[in-house]
Image (tube, grey):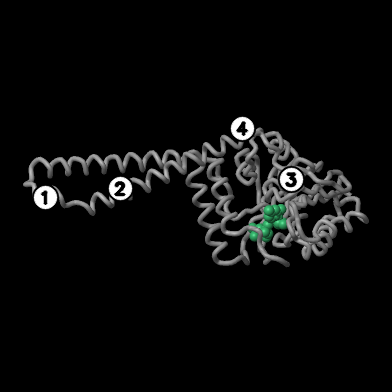
Amino acid sequence: MNKFLLSIIVPVHNEEKNIPILVERLSKAVQNYTYEILFIDDGSTDSTLSILKNSAATNKLLKIYSFTRNFGHQNALFCGYQKAKGDCVISIDADLQDPPEIIPTMVKKWEKGTQIVYARRQKRKDSPFKKLTAYIFYRFLNILSDVRIPTDVGDFRLLDKTVVTYIKNLPEHNKYIRGLVSWGGFSWDQVEYNRDERFAGTTHYTFSKMLNLALDGLISFSIKPLRVAMYIGFVTAMLGILGITYALYRRIFLPHEFWITGWTTLFIAVLFMGGIQLITIGIIGEYIGKTYQESQNRPPYLLKETTNA
Ligand code: UDP
Ligand code: MG
C-alpha cells in the first residue's frame, strides 16, 4: 500500500449505462492505492444517481456529490477539485473514452515529482467533425491567448495537491479549468493513449456547447479579440477616408452626369460597415457580459445531496 491518497473525480451527466462498467474498471485500476472516487452528478435526469447510490452503499470509497440541476461539465469538475482530499487528483470522463488503466502510469510520473500529468490523445475515435473543430480550436486559442494550452489534451489529467489548491483559491468565477491549469506554469509531463469511442450514450457536447466552451476559453484568456476589432476598425476607417476622397473628387471635378451613379458602392459600404460595427459591438459585449457575471458573485453550483461525503 502506498502512503499517499489518490482522488479520482468523475463528472457525470446522464451516464446510466456507463456507470457499472466504469466503477468496475476504475476500482480495478486503482486497487493498489489508497483512494477515493468522487462522482459529481451534474443534474442527471436518468437513473444515474440511483445507480451511483447503489454502488456507494457497499463501497464507502465511492462518494457522490449531486447538483440541484445541470451546471455544466466545468463546474462539476471544479466541485470535484474543491471536495477532493487527495495528495494527487485525477479527473476522468464517465463514458470510458478515457481508459482508467493508464492511471498507474500517470501516478508513477507524479511520484517522480511532476505536478501535472496530462493524458494526451494519440488517436481518437471521434467523428471527423469533432476532430477538425478540436484541432482548429486549440491552434486558434494558442495564437490568440497568452497561455500555451497543450494541444490534444482534454480533461483527463492528474494534478498535484498544490495545483488543486491554486485552482480552488483563484477568485474568478468563470473558470476555464483547462486553461487555468496550464496558466499556472507548473511542471508537467504527459502519458499518451488512444481515445476510445463512447461506451454508451451520446456526447453531451453539442456543437453549440463546444462553441460556447471555446468562446469562454478565448474570452477568459485573452483580450486580443478587442485589439483585433480595433485593428479592423483602423483598416476600415482608412478605406473610408479613401472613399471620401474619391467621392469629393467626383463631386467637385467631374461633370454632374457622374453624380447620381455609385449606388452599388454606397450600398456595399453601408452593409460592410454595419457588419463590422455589429461584430465589434458583439466582441465588446462579450467582455462586458463576463465582467457582469463576475460581479454577480454567484456560486458555480448548488448541492442537492451527498453520499459518503
Ligand atoms: N458532463 C457533465 N455535465 C454536462 C455534460 C457532460 O458532467 O453538462 C460529463 C459527462 O457525463 C462526461 C464528461 O462530462 O463524463 C464529458 O462529456 P462528454 O463525454 O459528453 O463529452 P465529449 O467526450 O464528447 O467531449
Ligand atoms: Mg466523452
What residue is drawn where x is 48% and y is 44%? 144
If the image is split into quadrants, where does the C terminus sit? top right
Compare marks 2 and 4 and give the one earlier in the sequence. Answer: 2
- Circles 3 and 4, Cβ within 8 Å, touching? The answer is no
* Whether residue 128 is situated above or below residue 241 in the rendered picture: below
> Which badge, 1 or 4, is on the more N-terminal residue?
1
Q: Secondary structure at mark 3?
A: loop
For the residue pair 8 and 133, the one nearer the viewer reads as 133
Q: Amino acid at mark 2?
A: Val
Label 4 crowding class (10 Å Cα cut-off): few <14, some 14-19, many 20+? few
Looking at the image, tell me whether mark 2 or mark 3 is earlier in sequence order: 3
Quote the CA–CA distance across marks 2 and 3: 62 Å
According to the image, label 1 marks what residue?
Answer: 258
* Picture disc at residue 65: none
Instruction: Quickly name the residue at label 4.
Output: 295
Residue that protrudes farthest toward the right in the picture: 58
Which numbered circle lies on residue 270?
2
Disc 4, SS: helix
Mark 2 neighbour density, 10 Å: few (under 14) some (14–19) many (20 or more) = few
Task: Say which of marks 3 and 4 sits in front.
Answer: 4
Q: Residue at x 67, y 47 (%)?
A: 74
Please say if the residues under marks 2 and 4 sit with CB atoms less than 8 Å apart. Answer: no
Residue 109 image position (x, y, % from top left): 72, 49
- Dot label at residue 112: 3
Q: Residue at 57% across / 53% down in the picture? A: 151
Disc 1 marks a residue whose amino acid type is Phe
Quarter holding ligand 1: bottom right
Asked if ligand 1 lies within 8 A of label 1, the reply is no
Q: Is mark 3 within 8 Å of ligand 1?
A: no
